[in-house]
Image (tube, grey):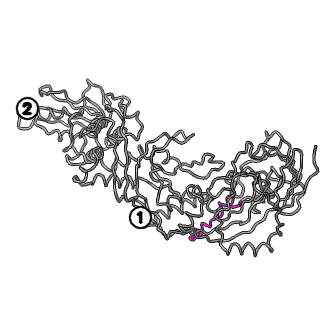
Amino acid sequence: MSHAPRSIPGLRSSGPRSSGPRSSGPRLRSLSLVLLLAGSASACVPALEAPDDADPEELALEETRTARLRFLRLDAKNFEQVLTKKDIKEKFPERVLRETWLLDMDLEPLIGNALGILIDTPAEEAYTLPRSSLNMWKLLNMTPANTVLTGSSLAPLLGVGKAVGLAPSLILSDLVALDPNTNIITAGLTTEAVIDDVVDTHPNARWRRGPVDAAHLDGLYPISKKGSMPVSLYDVVTDFADLTKTFGPAPAHAGKTDTAAHPGFISSAAPIVAATDDFAMTVRVNLNALPYKGVDLTTASVASINSTSSQIGGVFDFSSDTWLEIKGLVPELVIGEMTMAIYEHPEFIEGGAAKAPEQQGDSQAWDLPKYQFEALIADVARRKSADIPDRCTIYSPEGEVEMPLEAVKVCTGDNGDDADGSEPPHWTTIAVDDSVILDTPAPAPAYFWDILLEVAQIRLHDGGLAEGAGDINFTLRDIPAGITTAALEQQIRDNIKKNPAALAALAELLNENTEGDADFYYYVAKPGNPEPMRGDWLYFIAPDDIEETRSGAPVRPYSYAHPGFYRDPELTDKASSTQLLDGDTAHEKVQLSPLDVLYIEDDKGSRFKLTAKSKPGRHEVELDITRID
């Protein structure tokens, strides 16, 4: 049985229908804004009716009620809000602080500084380190002169040297194209490999947390630069309290095929003090301070939606140097103490013995997770090989001989011997003349990185460390992060200019005025739009429009099976789209004219018919709302 239409006063606001707690929000409006609102209301907008405190009843099946919606504007120009460190920590939900992204900080300077400090550790201090860390120090300080070849595939060089009177370090020096006392593995090459293989393979160096919206339903956003750490407002005001959590053990992000579980690479860290107690952010905004009026379909009653998020593209005046000011940052970020971790494979990984596949070989190291020690060392060695020219060197015995003997021939690349086929670049062969008597055969041909991989693994276990017990944890102190306050602030400003939505949640809480549980709201397009785009529009709410509790959790789930507006009761012919209008692409929206009929579904799965009536005013619409299911 149908019911006669029931009129609902235009600006009556329903109470919340959800069972979750309501959020009062941090409501940081200054007195000046309150006075502005009060002083302007009587002159610029219609008088507001007193709200009815009684909760309206749910709309019955086939019942029709009428709702009148007004679009009101009250523009606050250059409104200033100062947020101190205490304000930010105490008055904003932690989730909002975590999702307020400021920049992606390049970790290469930090990793490079850490490795440089380890390499430069004095020997007397290095020998007090845990065995695996000491062995890593030795590897990073390995030179042709001090390399211990015992147990490796290069061990036969010891016999070659003894037989022809050549120091093994001389041959090894030529093999790596370095002076005998120059480090084979440099901090620069290792830093590059650590960034690519250890840092960039961590899920939290690929994706960061952010607000859930139509384009990011999982709340994940890509990191803008390889090898970077996402920095949020939470990190700045808590001295990067989550550093070990961010880059400790982590599972793969669901649905992100470019991530895999990772053991982490920072096992402990002291706070990184970025902001002093005098830290403050001053933001100046231009916005319509009044909410949008919408409808809670369940009760066909009027509700309010915070208007800030949809205006975020124009909230900040980037033409002014004072739109954002930050003070109280420390001059330079420094980590007082940090322990970096690199984990080894539980078994010894043999170097490759085949030329194919070319430029890699057949070692199992290339099939390991890139963050494991063996894969990392193989990559460092391959990077090092780019500095080694392809050539051959011939060594003769010491002393004067009537006919010089080509006792040893060391080649990188083609060795000129047609009998063994052509050699690819970086393929290493060591040939010993038959007249030289050796206790063991000469080293087998291999890629340079396969040779260095074996040497590094053996040296990692010096001192009796068992295979699989060589995980490296080295603790370093006073490590510069490699970014200054000026650079930090400039990156924050530049990133927000490119993506004003980064501060959307923060700006919204400065103007928190959501009331009720609207399913859609009324919007009037700006007059500067092309003629076909002007006029009245209905917007279906997006996840960001749902009010939040003090802890930052939504008061109700975004549980719409068919968001948007449709032309048919079965909701198969969508009339709305997320087309761009006044900077908004997040909402399903449809232009509205008198007598239009639309169909819509609420978050409980009930369907409704919307019928637009004659316009009661310039910036007003009146809708008959009938529940049909």
- Residue 550's spot in the image, x, y percent? 63, 58
| Residue 620 is one of the magenta-drawn residues | no
**Residue of label 1:** 332
- Describe the element under mark 1 as helix, strand or loop: strand
| Marks 2,1: beta carbons within 8 A | no
Measured Cα–Cα span from mark 2 to mark 1: 66 Å
**Residue of label 2:** 403
Query: What residue appears at the point 18 percent right and 41 percent down from the top-left corner?
Result: 169
- Describe the element under mark 2 as helix, strand or loop: loop
Q: In which quarter of the image is the C terminus?
A: top right
- Residue 99's spot in the image, x, y percent? 57, 55
Q: Quadrant of residue 451?
A: top left
Q: What residue type is labelled 1?
A: Glu
Depth order, front residue of 520/383: 520
| Residue 317 is one of the magenta-drawn residues | yes
- Residue 160's spot in the image, x, y percent? 15, 33
In the image, the segment drawn in magenta is: 306-323
Which residue appears farthest toward the top when viewing the image? 419
Q: Is residue 584 visible to the viewer in this orientation of the structure?
A: no
Depth order, front residue of 324/360: 324
